[in-house]
Amino acid sequence: MQIQEIHKWQKDHGAHNTVPVERACAERMIRLGEIEMEIKQMIQDRLKKVEEIKQTLELGKSSTQREIDDCMQVFTSLVHMIERSQAEVIEVIKEKQKATEKQAKGFIEVQEQEITDLMKRIAELQQLTQTEDHVHVLQSFPSMCTIPQTKDLSDVTVHTDPCLGTVRTALSKLVEFITEEENRFSSKDLGRMQQYSADVTIDDNTVHPELILSMDRKQLGHGNIRYDRPKNPKRFDFIIASLGMHRLGSGRHYWEISFGTMMRFLPKLLMIALLVFPTTISIKGPFVAAQDATEDEEVAEDVIAEDEDDEAEVEDDENTELTEEKEEEEEEDASSGEAKASPHADTTILFVKGEDFPANDIVKFLLGFTNKGSEEFVVESLDASFRYPQDFQFYIQNFTALQLGTAVGSQRQATFEYSFIPAEPMGGRPFGLVINLNYKDGNGNVFQDAVFNQTVTVTEREDGLDGETIFMYVFLSGLGLLVVVGLHQLLESRKRRRPTAKVEMGTSSHNDVDMSWIPQETLNQIMQSRRDKASPRRSPRKRAQKRSAGSDE
């Protein structure tokens, strides 16, 4: 039976190459030794990675402890600052209250003294008005008719809130302290974050048509109008956005974003973004199996096939990149090979209405062409276009080209007129205006002269007065009239003052006495005494008695 099986095996595998069992076993043993070495190397790599992770954890612990110490220091300083500010504010409030009380006490003493003096003057006046000695009244009147000098009550003020603004000042100092600490830690954190800085370059093939891309492809602006960009399946059409040239992988990435006004990329740093992505570790290695020789050979063939596929993909990618680079170089060469101006021709431009470009209005200019050479030039066409102010290679609006076909002989001149109308939505925005003159010489060489190549601003058209503007003018006029009337009434009310009180300036003789200051009762007595003195019915005896009593009759 065994001989039959051997014979059958020889019959089935007689055409196959055979090796001795010892040799095949030795080859398998060598392969197993190689696999064992690879596994040991994998173990060493993982042990090394474990050590790196442990070291990272230790560094993280020390960094965490340092952050805790800084936090404790900052908040301890903040607590001390708050307590010190509280004590200072309370002390300032008490000092201001004491100063206010002292000032009020001084005012009260002065007012009480003035009240005492005024009461004395009232008593003297009452005593003088009750006396019957007319001569004494007249003699004392000049000194008693004046009001005593007192302190102006408008200068005597005591504030009810002497501590106004004290707490706010203390809080401002506290906020300054917190801001300084925040800036200190922000600068420290910024220094650590900047080690993860990433260079972001915007992909021009993905920019939305309403966005304007700078020359260095690092700045974007919103143009508020839709520009005509080359079609690309990667370009955003509905969402105003764009993508970067390079893909950001896992880990930490830092970049700074500046916001500015439209068409002006001013470096105003307003926001710092730090994106932390979870780091993933992909473990790839050969799947080792030592079941039998057949499975090993199949695995080896699969690995070789995969490696060949990967190499083919890499070669395709490299070929694609080389092709794209060649296309870009060809485009650059083509762009650099554009027609230029002839050294034997000269051009001048004159705008009829000045360099003002009102929207939805005619802009007209005259173009002068001078042939300084010995050959004849044929001016074929004249065209104008609006372009991106940041990159004149991108067109925004093309105007109809003026076909001329005018021959200009040697040492001759020609003048051409051209006009265009800027679109109304372009009002209030800057654009690059390019005016080209196309001509050729007798040999068929084509030339192009950029007569005007500058950034201009399209002004918005004034529509005149509308209903809203008229209403605003009427409202402001009425408001101004009300203000004038109010000021007039205020001035008139100030003019209506009470007549100034008369002031007795004294008397130099008996005839200069101001009778209006003498009480009516005294005047009646004086008049009665004069009548009695002039009456013949009065006896000399009564006159003598009155004279002896001190009367001046």
Image (spheres, helix red, strand yellow):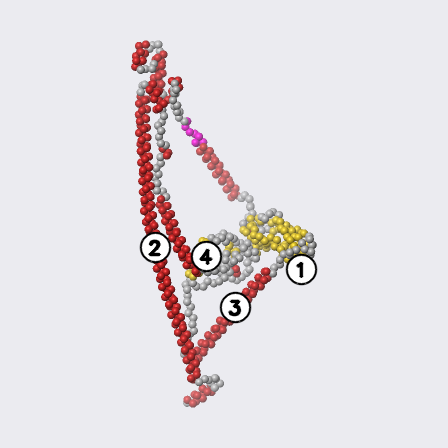
Which of these two is toward me, 73 or 303?
73
Is 191 in the magenta?
A: no
Q: Which residue is mark 2?
A: 73
Badge 2 or badge 3: first in the primary sequence: 2
Identify the element where label 1 is drawn.
loop
Residue at left offset 31%, top offset 42%: 94
Amino acid, disc 4: Glu
Q: Which residue is mark 4?
A: 256
Separation (CA) of disc 4 from disc 3: 33 Å
- Looking at the image, tell me whether mark 4 or mark 1 is earlier in sequence order: 4
Quadrant of the rendering where the N terminus is positioned: bottom left
Q: Separation of disc 2 and disc 3 at Cα?
A: 57 Å
Q: Amino acid at mark 2?
A: Gln
Image depth: mark 4 or mark 2 in front: 2
Q: Residues within 10 Å of mark 4 (few under 14, many from 20)?
A: some
Q: Which numbered disc, 4 or 2, marks the residue that appears first in the sequence?
A: 2
Q: Is residue 478 above or below residue 303?
A: above
Based on the picture, tell me whether residue 497 belongs to the magenta stretch. Answer: yes
Find disc 1 in the rendering and name its residue: 444
Disc ID at residue 318 = 3
- Residue 300 is situated, as x and y percent measured from the top left of the image, at 45, 76
If you read the primary sequence from the N terminus, does the residue marked by circle 4 or circle 3 appear first? 4
Drawn side of residue 163 relative to residue 215, left or right: left
Q: Foreground: 401 or 141?
A: 141
